Image (cartoon, grey):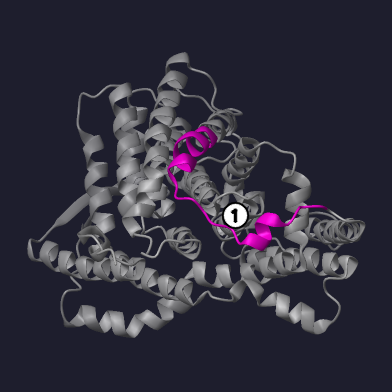
Amino acid sequence: MRKRSIKDRITLDPIMTLIVLIIGTLVLSGFLSLLGVQVTYNTIANDITIEYTQSLVSVDSLFNLSGLKYIFTNTVSNFVSFTPLSSLIIILIGIGVMEKSGFLKTIITLLTKKAKKKNVTYAIVLICLLSSIMGNLPYVIMIPLSALIFEYGRRNPYIGIIASFAALSAGTGLSIYLTGTDSELLTSTLLGSHMLNPSYSLGTGSFFLIMLVAIIILSIVITIITENYIAPRLPKYEFQETDIEEELIITKKELRGLIIAGFAGILYLLFFIYCIIPGLPLSGALLDYSKELYIDMLFSPTSFFSHGFVFIVTMFFVILGLFYGIGAKTIKNNKDLCDDLGHSLDGVGKTLVLIFFASIFISVFKRTGIGIVITAGLANLLTIESLGAFPLIIILFIISALSTIVLPNSTMKWGIMASIAVPTLMNVGISPEFIQVIFRFGESVTMGLTPLMAYYVIYLAYLEKYNQDKKPINLFQTLKYQYPYTIVIAGILLSLLIVWFIIGLPIGIGGVTRI
């Protein structure tokens, strides 16, 4: 019998790695608190008078009895309220019906049977980049579906998981539409701009053009990296013999199922779309009319649409799978349907454990305030005097990228940075809207490199699910898969910013680079 190497013996399971990170965070918080680590930064105290105030943040030690009490008293509630948990479980119910009924295999076969491999990858990447308008929900939709698409296409599911996560995380700050997050960031941007120009205003299409160009370029680049660098280096994936030998032929029965499912799905979508259109008779039931902007009516935390979007998507998946099963006769009775509902939840025990420890790690790290202290400290670098426009563009881009690793929350991060970054860069002639684009591009670079991003655990869990190696997938190995994307995307987005600023092209409708 071959002896295991030292490297094999010390490889930590992702669960154990998360436990080590939790303990490390507790110890680090105690050490930094003992040193008295704290940072002050400027914030806007009054929205009307636009006056600065000094905010002091320090590291809160959890390496003590109070920290132990926090973990024991908040672990259950944090786990239950951990958004990726509920979103994944609910979405998997819908995906299970589509998969078990045969809908996914049939539709994927129909769409990809004659398509080139790189074209399938490109389509997935582009969809992931464009899906940022839906917030974080695409992580729990596109990662599982991408794995199945590649598996049905007789390719390693790892390719779909890695590529979709890279595109989803890169697309965090890239949206051709003004998302709910962009709207919140815009508020902080305008407050910062009003320090120098109280009448400055921005439109909802101010970022459209530069975002569109970035998405087009990155969709091509991520596809190239995936096909030419990532895929050839992945271990061989062994398919079941029955799956390999089975010829993918769509019968009349399956086509009938697709037609019925398509008709039912279109009716559901029309009803859903009517519910988010304001001003028509009995329409707009899912909107929050306390907001002014339509995007806020749709995606504000208090809107019915925002609260129910996961369930809305799940019901759409269930309808597609159910009506396909009825048409294709793969669902014959209520027992078949009920079995299909739980299909994707089979064997998710380890995924739930991963999510459990990820929720503890994220909660503990957030409680210590380490991320806020580091972000505030980095933001203060922008106060260095005698810097020109180009150095400031580069510094803000790097600060945004670095701070995202320890503080992935875009709204909280920009709330700390905007009151410093916006006036500073405006003083050298950079427009507020372009400043926000720099920030968004920067965080798009490293969002895929931080386990503190709540949905990173979905990526980790699916790599573990499709892992055929006897040793567990290592957390740092999952990060390694994302490094090539990060390096190339950083170079492309920073170059795009600099070239755009030099040429002086408009970045959107009414959006400019210079003031």
Residue toward you, 393 or 362: 362
Could you say which quadrant of the image residue 259 lies in? bottom right
User: Is residue 46 magenta-colored?
Assistant: no
Residue 418 image position (x, y, % from top left):
36, 43
Give the structural element (helix, strand or loop) at label 1.
helix
Residue at x 61%, y 62% (from the top left corner): 240
> Can residue 297 be seen in this snapshot?
no
Pick the front one: 31 or 20: 20
Q: What's the residue type where badge 1 is placed?
A: Met
For mark 1, what is the residue?
A: 142
Residue 10, placed above or below residue 81: above
Q: Is residue 237 magenta?
A: yes
Which image quarter is the N terminus in?
Answer: bottom left
Q: Residue at x 56, y 61 (%)?
A: 140
Q: Is residue 214 above or below residue 410?
A: above
Q: Is residue 193 left or right of residue 374?
A: right
Q: Position of residue 168 (x, y in %)?
A: 52, 48
Instruction: Specify whether 469 is left or right of 157.
Output: left
Q: Which residues are magenta?
A: 223-249
What crowding class fits label 1: few (fewer than 14 Cα within 10 Å), some (14-19), or many (20 or more)?
A: many
Q: Looking at this view, name the residue that lies furthest to the left.
A: 35
Instruction: Please count the marks in the image.
Output: 1
Q: Position of residue 316 (x, y in %)?
A: 75, 63
Foreground of the two, 340 or 456: 340
Residue at x-position 41% and y-position 36%: 193
